[in-house]
Amino acid sequence: MIMLIISAIVALTVELIPHEDCDPPGVNGTSTAHGVPGWVEPIAILATVLFVINLAATSDWKQARAFAKQSLELQKSNRKTVIRNGTQVDVTDRDLVVGDLVVLDNRQLAFVPADGA
């Protein structure tokens, strides 16, 4: 992308700078062999690069938003049964405190809350 931007800027600059040995751009209506003004291609390249950058940024933003939503749902649904003060209570992993006894069953064996120390 950076190379495309630099190339487009250089091409646009070269096209817009008047040359001593030829007519200024647009004097005869065109400055290329195809009948199109020379500044059209660099502007088209810059517009395309801006479009692709915005498309990628929008995609990344949507993915980040979806990940945050999914993470929040997982955090809310990830509940553990603990024995706290002699009573069984369902709590999230964030609400676990020192002294809680975690009740494990077959469903919860894959995710045992521990500090790893």
Image (cartoon, rainbow, N blue to C red):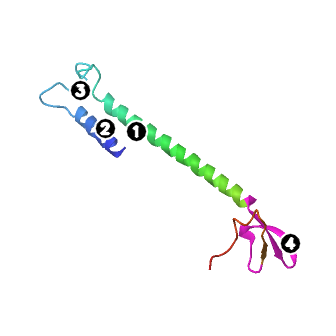
Label 1, on which residue?
A: 49
| Marks 2/4: CA–CA distance | 68 Å
Q: Is residue 18 left or right of residue 50?
A: left
Label 4, on which residue?
A: 88
| Marks 2/3: CA–CA distance | 17 Å
Any mark on residue 74, and which?
Answer: none
> Looking at the image, is mark 1 or mark 4 nearer the viewer?
4
Q: Tell me which label, 2 or 3, sits earlier in the chain.
A: 2
Query: Which amino acid does the dot numbered 2 rest on?
Result: Ala
| Marks 1/4: CA–CA distance | 59 Å
Residue at 74% x, 59% y: name it. 76
Viewer-side residue, 28 vs 42: 42
Disc 3, SS: loop
Q: Which residues are magenta?
A: 76-99
> Looking at the image, is mark 2 or mark 3 nearer the viewer?
2
Q: Is residue 92 magenta?
A: yes
Label 2, on which residue?
A: 8
Query: Which amino acid does the dot numbered 4 rest on?
Result: Gln
